[in-house]
Image (tube, rainbow, N blue to C red):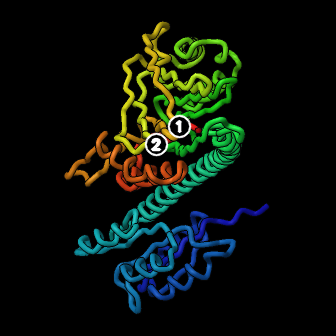
Amino acid sequence: MKTIPQHILIAEDEAHARVSLSLILEGAGYGVSVASDGRQALDRILGSKDSQSPVDLLILDIQMPVMNGLELLDALDEHQVSVPSLVITAFGEKDLLKTLMRKGCRDYLDKPFTPEEVLSSVESMLERHARMETDRSQALSGLADEQVKLRYEADAWKAEYQRLRGEVNSAVTSFSQVMGRVPADCKVRVACQIRPLSELGGDYFGVANTAAGCDILIADVAGHDMGASYQAVLVKSFFDSVFRERHEAVDVMKALNDLLYNKGNNDRMVTALFLRIDLLKGRADCVSAAHPNVIRVPGSGESLKTLSTTSDPLGLRPVVDLDTNVFPLISGDRLLLCTDGLVNVERRYGVESGRSRLSADAFEQMVQAHRAASLQAMVEGVWEAVLQFCRHRPSDDMLLAAVEVPG
């Protein structure tokens, strides 16, 4: 198979210089074409660009008619054609040469030149250009390989993300179905609003009928991530067991602490409140584990009453100190329960202006403003008032529930 010689274009307006350069280069085995001005040179370069013998090297004079060397290089740049260029210079053209070098010229030949100087410069330029092309090709090949790897990795991560997203969606659906459910045959009237900060959260509310009335458990796991939701599910599984019905209220909470400490993340605090309503005896046993206080809304229209207790949170220590608050149940009274994400909301005024937290008095005023409404409407009214206070930008999971003592 015949090898095509490297193609050198000579752009020179002086005939004797074109002839002498052609003889030197053809004698060395190069393919040579000539142009007498810059315009001809541009046409030949563009015309051979997609042929089997494109111009491999341009030897050009600076001073040429129609289009000089500087204009020729500008035209090649406009056409996005890159050809290594060897400039022929004469005395006094060094300043112009600097401009040409900045436009891509790699070397120059001073007139007069010898055949050895011509061939040495041509060979050096072609070798340098070949190395550059090899490096560029290898770089592009490596880049292409890297792109393929990245594409495979991206596809794998996308598939994994979609799988995890599906699992999270399923978990979110299941979580929302079990957190805050009230049985249809509940022996007391209950209303509840629950909202995780993100898709999963750590707030739990459960109600279960008993022989004498019902048990209610509200819990708040620190955090609002999947770990918090796992703890909340532990709380629910515990509350769903029949174990609690055979024990006193305080013992139920201690058993819950054992579960959270031994099977949960015991570096994650859980506050909780267990309320056992005994309709036969007309009383309620309330055990709080560092949880926000219960607000009692008397049906008689009397002032709100806060039922406060002091105790330890759950899940951090194997033994906790818990107290029971026992109080009578009066027909028509309401008990308001919540997590601290609701009562500790903040109103932000901007980076410089700071923020203000919802006070206990302000929260009670919200309850007072809606106490005359039905149970569900009261909960919804207080809930909306809290959201308006924080401009619908809560910073934690939120839960609000109310219980009404039947006649």
Q: Which residue appears at 57% of the width and 44% of the height?
A: 191
Q: Do the CB atoms of the residues marked 2 and 1 lie less than 8 Å apart?
A: yes
Viewer-side residue, 330 vs 147: 330
Report x, y in % for residue 283.
53, 24
Above or below for 286 versus 319: below
Say which mark, if any, is on residue 299.
2
Amino acid type for the residue under numbered disc 1: Ser
- Marks 2/1: CA–CA distance: 7 Å
Which quarter of the figure has residue 38?
A: bottom left
Disc 2 secondary structure class = loop
User: Which residue bears the numbered disc 1?
Assistant: 331
Amino acid type for the residue under numbered disc 2: Gly
Report x, y in % for residue 49.
61, 75
Q: Which residue appears at 59% of the width and 53% of the height?
A: 140
Which quarter of the figure has residue 182?
A: top right
Viewer-side residue, 183 vs 121: 183
Report x, y in % for residue 250.
52, 14
Above or below for 319 versus 207: above
Which quadrant is the N terminus positioned in?
A: bottom right
Residue 16 visible somewhere in the drawing: yes
Disc 1 secondary structure class = loop
